[in-house]
Image (tube, rainbow, N blue to C red):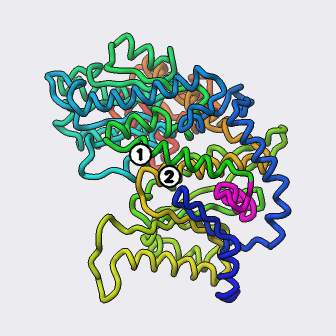
Amino acid sequence: MDKMHLWERYKNHLCTSPEIGLMVDIGRMNFGEGFLREMEPRMQKAFAEMAALEAGEIANRDENRMVGHYWLRNPSLAPRAELDAEIEFTVRAIREFAAAVHDGTIAAPGGRRFTCLLVVGIGGSALGPQFVADALGTAADRMRPYFFDNTDPDGMDRVIAAIGPRLAETLVVVISKSGGTKETRNGMLEAKRAFTEARLDFPKQAVAVTGLDSELDRTAVAEAWLARFPMWDWVGGRTSVMSVVGLLPAALQGLDIDGLLDGASRCDAVTRGTTTKCNPAALLALMWFHATGGRGEKDMVLLPYKDRLLLFSRYLQQLVMESLGKESDRDGRVVSQGIAVYGNKGSTDQHAYVQQLREGVNNFFVTFIEVLQDRQGPSQEVEPGATSGDYLAGFLQGTRQALSDNGRESLTITVERIDPQAVGVLIALYERAVGLYASLVNINAYHQPGVEAGKKAAAAVLQLQGSILAFFGNAGEEAYTAEEVAAAIGAPAEVETVFRILLHLAANPDHGVTMLKEKDICLSRFTTVS
């Protein structure tokens, strides 16, 4: 395709939204000229379903829940007055709490001001806050954020070591809607241990973000934690960044949460429009449908050319893949839907995997994210007539052209700068695109049965471990193979899992299991006698 034809295509398909500082270019996606027209009836149906969702329809039918993350940045849209009031009250409480922490009214024992923030969560309770913290954080932040976002002991040890003596001035925010998420529970207990070892009073430095009367909520009440904030069942974890989940850590860090909410609200207004060519979220959804055949046949590669957007692909992995990765559609038919997401940042990726993108297997489409403003203030020239930011922009354009020259599809999202409003816009843009795409392919974007299946399987493994430890508690001095242990606990069919549990137990001193290694490792024996 010659460059003049590409220019005409660019002009014809460029969606500009100046009210939110956003442009979406779909001209390098190789859809036919009839594609948008053919998809219009399905798109209008998706718009109608989104309108019903925002009006309070039970959109998550499996869990009999409304889906209300759009109300978080415009409470007047909530279908009931009490929800509107509760959202407004909670955002006001966040602002007041953060202000009291910053001015020292709320302080650590001994009157020490809080200077560090430890967020304990997993999935949406960590990915959204982490993305916002990294995208908008500066050296001037009121509090420095840290995260327990996994149940990896070594990872938590590293975070505590990084905080060091400032643990005495660290506010801990524990986030779990159900209050029973094991990874978050484990992180809370590890944090408590670290505070106890430092001779600090954990409850006086702890805040809970959870559902009313959850296990975590009851713990916070019983132990008289510093504060408690609500999570609502109509906000899913992957769309919770505009709720207390994301706003409280951001406000404590000192970020502009009003800007975040405003950007998201204004993007919602633009992407609520039903004129498809003027709706950037609708165009994203349609390009996903085109690129993947509506069946996830290609991966989504995200290439933001901005260091501050490094974590955006991780955030979108959950938002897109947990929402769209579904075995069955809303009619119960097996469809095996989903779009895989991966990415890092430009121009780093040009020295990593762009070689494969241009010349390897063509199983992807690229989303470039372009940020026009390089930095606040002027930049030096690194050579006559060019700054380092000019090079970054040049590499984006060059990569986009190199991919296009070899028939590789891409779309480009352009924002003017990275600030709270722009981050709010990007989050809202993708939330809407995910919802619209889910309607196009007739799936429920708001449940996660596969995640629940994984949790149940993990619980079964830990139950099996309990049986193994009970067996060794009465086993005397004998050593046993995994097959013998599995038979002894009445689970011979689970011998592979038993063996893998035994390997882990023997590698750690916590349960007193040791391994007598054989050349054929599967014949190794295990005992509790040292």
Can the viewer see residue 229 in this picture?
A: yes
Determine which quarter of the picture holds residue 443.
top right
Nearer mark to the viewer, of 1 and 2: 1
Q: Looking at the picture, how far across and down is residue 374, in whole percent?
A: 37, 69
- Relative to 21, say whether 70 is above or below: above
The residue drawn where x is 84% and y is 38% is 331
- Point out the image quarter for the C terminus: top left
* Residue on which disc 2 sits: 314
Q: Residue at x 54, y 33 (%)?
A: 498
Q: Residue 334: x, y in percent?
A: 81, 44
According to the image, label 1 marks what residue?
Answer: 130
Q: Nearer the viewer, residue 27 or 443?
A: 27
Quadrant in the rendering for residue 402: bottom right
Badge 1 crowding class, 10 Å Cα cut-off, few under 14, some 14 to 19, many 20 or more, is many
Of the pair 22 and 463, the residue shown nearer to us: 22
Name which of mark 1 and mark 2 comes first in the sequence: 1
Helix, strand or loop at mark 1: helix
Q: Crowdedness of circle 2 by 10 Å Cα count: few (<14), some, many (20+)?
A: some
The overriding secondary structure of the stretch rendered in magenta is helix
Pinpoint residue 100: horizontal percent, then vertical percent. Answer: 27, 28
**Residue range (magenta):** 275-292
* Residue 159 relative to residue 14: left or right: left
Task: Name the quadrant containing residue 98.
Answer: top left
Give whichever of 26, 508 is nearer the camera: 26
- Say whether residue 84 is left or right of residue 61: left
Q: Do the numbered discs 1 and 2 sit on residues whose CB atoms are within 8 Å?
A: yes
Q: Is residue 291 magenta?
A: yes
Label 2 sits on what residue type?
Answer: Arg
Residue 227 drawn at (x, y percent): 35, 21
Q: Quadrant of the N terminus?
A: bottom right
Using the rendered image of the protein, determine whether residue 507 is visible from the camera's viewpoint. Answer: no
